Image: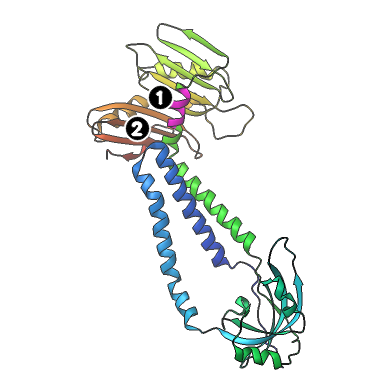
Amino acid sequence: MTTATVAPPTGAAPLDLARGFLTGGVIGAALAAFVVGCTLGRIPLIVAGPALLAVYALLFRLAGAPRRAREGALAPLTALALIDGREVRTVKDETDVPVCFDLTVAPDLAPAFRIRITQGVHVSELSDHRPGTVVVVRYPPDRPWLLRIVKRPTPKWEDRAAGAVLEPAPGPTLVADRQDGCAWSLTTLLGVLLGAAAVVLLMRAELFGKDTEAAAARPVASSSTSTSTSTFAVTATVDSMATGTVSFGPGRSVLDRGVLREAVESLAGGGAGRQALTVVVREQLLTVVFAPDGVSVPAFDPRSLPFDRLPALVEEARTALGVDAPRTWQLSAERLAGVLTIRVGVAGAGGSASLEADERGTVVRRSPAH
């Protein structure tokens, strides 16, 4: 009996891992887009999440159609196989138990080969699958690792198995149970996390701006100090993450010359100053979220903002981005992506618009009204 040399699968193929990573990325981005859209009230984002999943599923199906057609054109082979050995893996309170079989497969028109598979067998049929028993198997000719023992063969094959005498074949064993689940799962999980992170980073300015406004409006039961002057009143609230706010009295604007710089310095303190996670500015309110002590996060010195350029950025956003009758505006600064980013958003009867500037106050991106 001639033995075929069959190369067993050696784990997840690079293409399988790439598909898993891409699938995870699409799932993560779609879920994050849906959640962020619900949080911000953005209908396009809410719709984009499920739509992205549907489009990807359709493309994935179409891309695999040629392979499925090739595989479907090949009729499965039926052959006799000798059970060289078996290992019953006991499962409590189960009628079908997993059994690891070592088989010698003897096709009619091809060399014999050895294979190891795991297949569920009913407890009442374990005696029919003892070592030395000849059984009927079926498998795709181009993918022998998908081999299965036929539980109810046709009378013709049942008679052949009853009268056949096979010998164990020497040579390598094809391992059908590929150990690729862990690698594929980790790759897919990484794709999910990166896809979700990409969406959150793209919408970070609006998300963190929304969180900052909520934190500023929420009462906090903790130690606080307040001082008042004729120009503005400062209220600093300290909890697990220090938040400082400056509110300006009637007739005063945060964009008045020198007012914003003075307010930021009053919160940041002297010396090296405290590092900030986010700075949010509105017409008569300044909010600074400071980085927690002893934690490494992408923070910045709020006193390094280009204060002289901020009024011009707000004015450009209000007048040059196509928003008719702008009612509200908000300026935010953060360094979560590694570089300081200043974003100004405006909203009014004519819609909403925004622009982004770098650490020098130079505009790098404009999003007109829509």
Q: Mark 1 is on which residue type? A: Val
Task: Give coordinates of residue 74: x percent, y percent.
Answer: 50, 84
Q: Residues within 10 Å of mark 1 (few under 14, many from 20)?
A: many
Quadrant the C terminus occupies: top left
Mark on residue 348? Answer: none
Task: Give coordinates of residue 77: x percent, y percent.
Answer: 57, 86
- At mark 1, the secondary structure is strand
Residue at image position (50%, 10%) is 226
The relative height of residue 71 versus residue 298 in the rendered view (above or below) is: below
Principal secondary structure, stretch drawn in magenta: helix
Residue at image position (37%, 11%) is 249
- Which segment did they paint magenta? 209-216
Residues 120 and 241: in front is 120
Q: Residues within 10 Å of mark 2 (few under 14, many from 20)?
A: many
- At mark 2, the secondary structure is strand
Residues 30 and 91: in front is 91
The relative height of residue 269 versus residue 120 in the rendered view (above or below) is: above
Q: Mark 2 is on which residue type? A: Gly
Task: Give coordinates of residue 291: x percent, y percent.
Answer: 56, 28
Quadrant the N terminus occupies: bottom right
- Visible in this render: residue 2? no
Specify whether residue 214 is painted magenta: yes
Residue tagged by mark 2? 345
Q: Earlier in the sequence, mark 1 or mark 2?
A: 1
The relative height of residue 44 versus residue 125 in the rendered view (above or below) is: above
Residue tagged by mark 1? 281
Q: Residue 63 sits in which quadrant? A: bottom left
The relative height of residue 246 versus residue 93 in the rendered view (above or below) is: above
- Visible in this render: residue 173? yes
Residues 236 and 60: in front is 60
**Proximity of marks 1 and 2: CB atoms separated by less than 8 Å:** no
**For residue 12, side relative to residue 52 (left or right):** right
